[in-house]
Amino acid sequence: MGEGAVADGREGEAQLHAATRQKGVVEAERDACVSTADENESKAQQEEADVVIQIMKGKHNFGINLTRNSYGVVVTTLDKGSQAEQAGVQPGDRLLRVQDIDSKLPPENPGGEVVVTAENFHQTLACVRQMRYCRFFIKSQTAAAF
């Protein structure tokens, strides 16, 4: 009987470790929507946006394509007639922040602004793909040139 108790204890411990590992996987997936705090993020938080658009996800996307470069996250192309194009967003403009208007993301601060940096680009993009209706804060390339 004592032997069975030890085996049960070990089995319970193994189940606890398995549950802890699974919890870690879930937390890692949740944390994919979290931005990292760094010097670039602080600068982007302070930078004023020239264009703020509220945008609803279309059938497949938001109609705005982005890439990462040494300056941060920039617009590469826009879908013809998209809300972003109508708002005057142009290729070369920088995406500073995003905000989920449905107030579901990011998990630790639903509806809070997420600063977009070159370093957290992939995590933020994964988060934005889960959004349905959001706000983009954009710095115009032409306004930055003046």
Image (tube, rainbow, N blue to C red):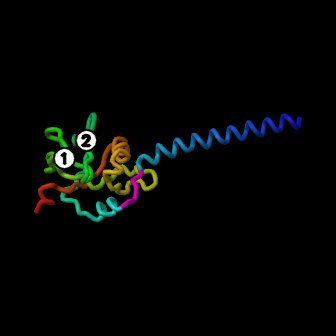
Residue 49 quadrant: bottom left
Q: At 28% from the left edge and 41% from the top edge, which residue is drawn?
A: 57
Amino acid under label 1?
Ala
Q: Residues within 10 Å of mark 1 (few under 14, many from 20)?
A: many
| Residue sitting at the far right | 1
Amino acid under label 2?
Phe
Contact (Cβ within 8 Å) of mark 2 with mark 1: yes
| In the depicted structure, whether residue 53 falls above or below residue 12 | below
Q: At 57% from the left edge and 43% from the top edge, which residue is drawn?
A: 23
Circle 2 is placed at which residue position? 62
Q: Earlier in the sequence, mark 2 or mark 1?
A: 2
Q: Which residues are magenta?
A: 34-38
Closest to the observer, 133 or 124: 124
Report helix, strand or loop for mark 2.
Answer: loop
Report helix, strand or loop for mark 1.
Answer: helix
Circle 1 is placed at which residue position? 84
Q: Would you say residue 141 sits in the magenta stretch?
A: no
Left or right, 20 with respect to 55, comes to right
Asked if residue 136 can be seen in this view, the reply is no
x and y percentages locating residue 3 in the rendered image: 86, 35
x and y percentages locating residue 6 in the rendered image: 82, 38
| In the depicted structure, whether residue 146 falls above or below residue 118 | below
